[in-house]
Each structure stands twice: as structure tokens, then as C-alpha cells.
Amino acid sequence: MTPDDFEELRILKKGATAYPDRPEQARLESFPNKYPSRDYLIEFDCPEFTSLCPVTGQPDFARITITYIPDRRCVESKSLKLYLFSFRNLGMFHEEITNKILEDFVAACMPRWARVVGRMNPRGGISIEVTADHVREGYLPPENLIKP
């Protein structure tokens, strides 16, 4: 790999960090996978995810875990952090949040397999866990890598 392989990583190279207000304003960046011939897991854990209830406007707190098997590209973590932070002022139900994160993540790096788990903290005495998976067509994930 050469420095040119990372030329498109604009967010990581910036001296100052700009925080997007909405996911549509955020940019998930990726870089070439140095080991595309092998299946391996990458896991991101965001224990301080926040968003707003779309009805009451009250804050919701969650832990978002993204696990994936990359293909040709890997997601850059700073851009992911800023993307996840962009939900903080957004009113959206948990099911939609989890699926939107999965869709945007898949669009950014086209992984072989990906899973997003949203573990929402209890509100009103009930916690919610939402799991959304993506499997590239024709790909069979290795059972020894994928945790149920």
C-alpha cells in the first residue's frame, strides 16, 4: 500500500473535526483491504450512541455494535464515529436506526457480510435490541467467524 491508497480519506486528514447534524450530511469513508483473500471479522462498538424519540423528542441511549467481514474495502473508524454521532439530534425509531446504519455501512464498503446490533437502553421499563444482517449475494459466511 502506498499513501495514494489513502488519498480519499479526507476526514482523517483534517486538522479540525466538523460534526455533521444528520446522517445524510456525514460521510462514511473506506480504504483498501490489505487482506481481501481471507475472511476475517472487524467489530466496531459504540457504547454511547444517542438519538431522539421521534414522538416525544426525549433522548434515547444505546450501544451500537457493527461486525463485518470486509471484501475489497474497510470502513475508516473516525468517519464512522462522526456518522454515528450525527444521529444525536435525529428523531427516529430504533428499528429504523439499526437498519439505516446497516444500509449506509454496506453502501460505504460493500462487505461480504455485516451485522448491526442496536441495544437500546430501557425507557419506560423496556429495552429494545434490534439486529439487522447483510449477506452479499452468493456468499456463505464461515460459521466459525459468525457469532449468533
Image: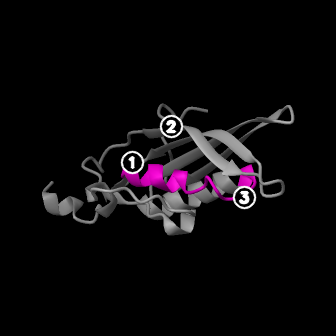
Q: Which residue is the site of mark 1? A: 77
Q: Residues within 10 Å of mark 2 (few under 14, many from 20)?
A: some
Q: Is residue 34 left or right of residue 142?
A: left
Nearest to the eye among marks 3 and 1: give it. Answer: 3
What residue sits 75% from the left and 54% below the top? 93
| Disc 1 element | helix
Say which residue appears at 29% left-offset and 52% top-offset. 33
Query: Which residue range is magenta in the image?
Result: 76-95
Amino acid type, residue under disc 2 in the picture: Asp
Distance between mark 3 and mark 1 Cα atoms = 24 Å
Q: Position of residue 78 (x, y in %)?
A: 38, 50
Residue situated furthest left in the rendering: 2
The label on residue 10 is none
N-term-proximal mark, 3 vs 1: 1
Disc 2 is placed on an element classified as strand
- Residue 136 visible to the viewer: no
Mark on residue 91?
3
Give coordinates of residue 57: x percent, y percent: 77, 54
Most foreground residue, 144 or 86: 86
Q: For mark 2, what is the residue?
A: 45
Looking at the image, what colour scheme do you see?
A: one colour
Q: Tag 2 or tag 3, which sits nearer the N-term?
A: 2
